[in-house]
Image (cartoon, rainbow, N blue to C red):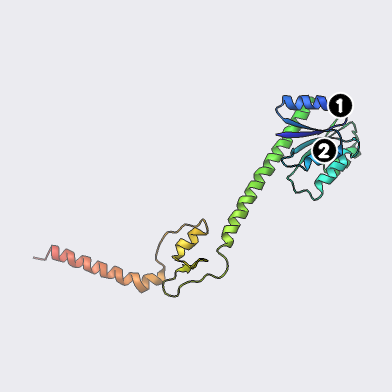
């Protein structure tokens, strides 16, 4: 997974890069907030960003605000990394759109754990997006069955858009995931099946008699 580091201090940036690569992440570097925003706007951009608060051109808070405002490129998990440590600083960073906040100097194990949290969030977001796409696709299939359907008054076949006639179950199966089993409704049983069944029983009884006549 790609992780963006936006840090103007060379030493801090190289230390962060060292640890992230050691943990198996692909690292993308930005030297100021403007570069970070340009990278996040690119195709296949990192989905986790570690931003220093105090940077030239555009600081970390401004990057957060831009990312959270009308952003349509997938969720970016933002970790603010700074020496600022008052409660008001934390509130300001979170309200600007940061997901997490780590004070300098940081403990490597804590940073690694917080990045893992971000990774889980991004993976959950991707999974949710995939499920939403699947749901939208299913809804599109359902919409194909809406509207006026031409149906034959005699045989009850349905006409499709290409002027072909289909059995109802064939048509519905083609445009949805529905499957059919067949039965007999009470009305049709009384009107059709009951007489046929009684006739079948009658013929069966006669055959038995013919096969085994009474003595």
Q: Element at badge 1?
A: helix
Q: Is residue 113 left or right of residue 87?
A: left
Kindly identify which numbered label has been placed on residue 36.
2
- Residue 91 appearing in the image: no
Q: Earlier in the sequence, mark 1 or mark 2?
A: 1
Residue drawn where x is 37% and y is 70% of the image: 189
Q: Is residue 2 left or right of residue 173?
A: right
Residue 185 lies, with reference to residue 127, above or below; the image says below
Residue drawn where x is 45% and y is 61% of the image: 170
Return the residue nearer the eye: 117 or 173. Answer: 173
Residue drawn where x is 49% and y is 59% of the image: 174
Q: Is residue 78 left or right of residue 212?
A: right
* C-alpha distance separating marks 1 and 2: 15 Å
Residue drawn where x is 48% and y is 62% of the image: 171
Residue 158 lies, with reference to residue 18, above or below; the image says below
Return the residue nearer the eye: 56 or 110. Answer: 56
**Residue at numbered disc 1:** 10
Residue 77 lies, with reference to residue 69, above or below; the image says above
Residue 212: image quadrant is bottom left
Residue 137 horizontal/vertical position (percent): 60, 54
């Amino acid at each position: 997974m790609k992780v963006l580091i936006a840090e103007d201090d060379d030493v801090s940036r190289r230390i962060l890069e060292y640890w992230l690569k050691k943990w198996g992440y692909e690292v993308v570097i930005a030297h100021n907030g403007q570069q970070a925003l340009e990278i996040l706007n690119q195709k296949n951009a990192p989905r986790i960003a570690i931003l220093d608060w105090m940077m030239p051109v555009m600081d970390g808070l401004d990057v957060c605000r831009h990312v959270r405002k009308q952003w349509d490129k997938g969720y970016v998990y933002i970790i603010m990394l700074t020496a600022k440590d008052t409660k008001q600083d934390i509130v300001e960073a979170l309200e600007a759109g940061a997901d997490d906040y780590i004070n300098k100097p940081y403990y490597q194990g804590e940073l690694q754990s917080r990045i893992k949290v971000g990774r889980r969030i991004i993976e959950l977001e991707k999974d949710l997006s995939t499920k939403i796409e699947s749901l939208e696709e299913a809804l599109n299939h359902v919409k194909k069955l809406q509207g006026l359907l031409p149906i034959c008054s005699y045989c009850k076949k349905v006409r499709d858009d290409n002027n072909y006639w289909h059995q109802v179950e064939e048509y519905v199966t083609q445009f949805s995931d529905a499957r059919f089993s067949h039965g007999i409704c009470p009305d049709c049983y009384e009107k059709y099946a009951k007489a046929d069944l009684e006739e079948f029983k009658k013929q069966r009884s006669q055959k038995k008699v013919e096969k085994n006549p009474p003595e």
